[in-house]
Structure formats: structure tokens, C-alpha cells
Image: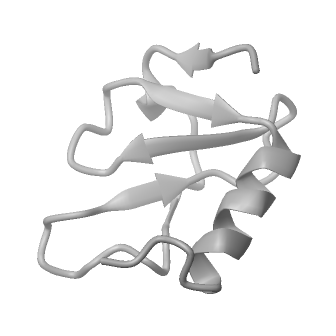
Amino acid sequence: MTERIIPNAAKLSCWRKSSHSDDNAGSCLEVLDNHPSGIPVRDSKVPHGPALVFPASGWSSFVTAVRSGAFPS
């Protein structure tokens, strides 16, 4: 996989908090839907920081694995 990075993720709008993020400002992951290059993902505590962009198929596989419990806490 070719790694893709958006250096300043704050330039993009319509971020949404992942349903798997906690509400205590600890693990806060945000994703951006409908981006032409894939699925950007960022740390909500660092909105002007970078976002990693994953291919849609890879992100979908990851979400499916999380939902099925493949990554125990």
C-alpha cells in the first residue's frame, strides 16, 4: 500500500468522530467520508496535524474486523 498523508487535515471539512472513539478526550479518531483519494483518518486532538488516507477497501476491512472483535481490548 502506498502511504498517503494530508499534512494539514484542518483544511478539510465535514469530519465525523468514529463511533468507536471514547467521550473522555482519550481515544478520539475522526474520519472523512466521500474524499476522492480514500478515507482520511486523523486524531481529533490534533486537528491541524496530519491525516492518513487509507484505500476504501482497506478501511472497510479494518472496520469489519473491529466490529467482529478481531482486536480485543
**37 in relation to 15, above or below:** above
Residue 33, position in %: x, y?
73, 55
Residue nearest the viewer, comparing 73 with 25: 73
Image-based side of 10 in relation to 49, left or right: right
Residue nearest the viewer, comparing 19 with 69: 69
Residue drawn at x 35%, y 73% as measured from the top left:
21
**68 in relation to 49, above or below:** below
Residue nearest the viewer, comparing 38 with 11: 38
Image-based side of 55 in relation to 65, left or right: right
Q: How many marks?
A: 0
Residue drawn at x 87%, y 33% as measured from the top left:
36
**33 in relation to 50, above or below:** below
**36 in relation to 70, above or below:** above
Residue 4, position in %: x, y?
64, 17
Please tell me in which quadrant of the rendered image residue 13 appears. Answer: top right
Quadrant of the frame with the N terminus: top right
Image-based side of 33 in relation to 53, left or right: right
Residue drawn at x 56%, y 75% as measured from the top left:
70
Residue 30, position in %: x, y?
46, 56
Quadrant of the frame with the C terminus: bottom left
Please tell me in which quadrant of the rendered image residue 61 appears. Answer: bottom right
Residue 67, position in %: x, y?
62, 83
Q: Identify the colour scheme used.
A: one colour
Residue nearest the viewer, comparing 2 with 52: 2
